[in-house]
Amino acid sequence: MQPKVVIETRGLRGSDDNVDLQRVATVYIGMDEYRVYAPPKATGYTLDWLPQMLVRQHDGTGETDVQGTHRAVICELLGKALQQNDQSSEASRTMTASTSIDSRRVFVVYGRNSKARAAVFDFLRAIDLAPMEWEEVIGATSKPSPYIGEALEAGFSMAQAAVVILTGDDLARVGKRYLKPDDTNDERVLTPQPRPNVLFEAGMALGKYPDRTVLVSLGSYRTFSDIDGRHLIRLSDNATARQALADRLRKAGCAVKTEYKSDWLQAGDFAAAIEDADVAVGKSRIRLKTFRRELRIDPEATYKRKIWIELKNESDECLLLRNPVWKTIPSGIHAAIRAGTFQLQLSNTWCPEKIGAQQVNLPPGDLCRLWAEPDEEHLDAQIKQLCRSDAPFGSVVLLANGEELSIPV
């Protein structure tokens, strides 16, 4: 395998800070990665500072200094790469740090969830940023199949930051041969996971530009300790999550504008972008039916008003029901379904009796129930009247054996 040199800057800015080195290039020799740094105060053309470069080998967890012949070989490779890429050497020697970076530009890495991509793009535009397609960054390298490091270099030379969208587009689990007794269900069953190329690009971006890379997640997926929790923002439609993303981009140097504006608090439908990767498009077989609905009021309970909704399995197969969400319809009731409210009818008893469950297996012909909490704007008398009528006043959207169903209530 031929050595590969990825040049990260040909012009040095210089700094009064005597500690922070300037990253110049990354050199790949076989499976080994070497990072080349210029002194903090170095300015002007990179090639002029080649004798004073510091070379470090990166092993994924840290860096160690490289000296002697090995260092000389790496510096020679870098020198040749700089000369080959700069035909006009005299002009290049007076070149200072590039000013082509646009503080409004953000390049976005995403998987196959097009709704997530559209929601993030809408939000970025609402805070006065200019999102770039990842393919646009690839095209900027002028190469048909650039190495990921070259694409990142091109992207960060044009944009101030990168946003990587993590969504559960794939399904994965550990092979049965390699399961361990203490493995969780995430390892044993097919679980959503971001696309491998997105994970790889996220890791590379964090490794090269940790302060200018922001990870955002939508929905649930398999956690992974190397990235999860670092620079990660869990997106939702609430103002707190939106503010967190705007603040993170501002810290990355982006020209974020939120002052005297409010559209960014609604721009981008993040809730609609959370999809189940294992639900095929167009599936709509209704196999559940609302059997009964009733408002119950308990002044001593944490949630005092509950609309209990009984569902009947009218199919000929057992259904695994999970992830219920209330959907409001025109002239209907605004409500919310809390997590862990499923109950299954066993004889004359609803089980589990008090706390409910996150999901239930509902046999053919059997009943289950869950409850929704109506908004305070709806009066008790109004809700009771709607429950006694034949007209629907909302719907429950849930997954039944992995298929998304919408059941009128």
Image: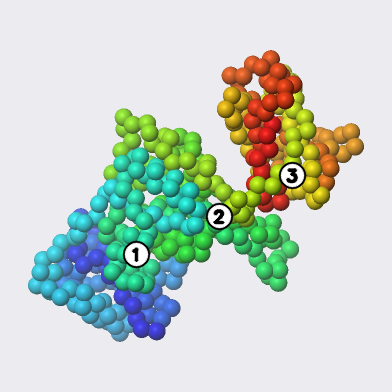
Distance of label 3 from label 1 (alpha carbons): 46 Å
- Secondary structure of residue under mark 3: loop
Q: Is 260 placed above or below 281 here?
A: above
Amino acid on which the number 2 mark rests in the picture: Gly
Can residue 153 be seen at all in this image of the molecule?
no
Judging by the rendered image, the residue that carries numbered circle 2 is 168
- Say which residue appears at 41% left-offset and 77% top-offset: 32
- Say which residue appears at 27% left-offset and 80% top-offset: 77
Q: Is residue 58 left or right of residue 329?
A: left
> What scheme was used to colour the molecule?
rainbow
Displayed quadrant of residue 294? top right
| Tag 1 and tag 2, C-beta contact below 8 Å | no
List x then y, in percent, for residue 302: 69, 25
The quadrant in which the N terminus is found is bottom left
Q: Is residue 198 left or right of residue 409?
A: left
User: Badge 1: few (under 14), some or many (20 or more) residues near its Cα, within 10 Å?
Assistant: many
List x then y, in percent, for residue 328: 59, 31
- The front one of 15 and 117 is 117
User: Badge 3: few (under 14), some or many (20 or more) residues near its Cα, within 10 Å?
Assistant: some
List x then y, in percent, for residue 402: 67, 51
Amino acid on which the number 3 mark rests in the picture: Arg
- The front one of 133 and 157 is 133
Q: Is residue 47 left or right of residue 64?
A: left
List x then y, in percent, for residue 316: 81, 49
Q: Earlier in the sequence, mark 1 or mark 2?
A: 1
Q: Which mark is residue 287?
A: 3
Judging by the rendered image, the residue that carries numbered circle 1 is 138
Q: Is 228 placed above or below 313 here?
A: below
The quadrant in which the C terminus is found is top right
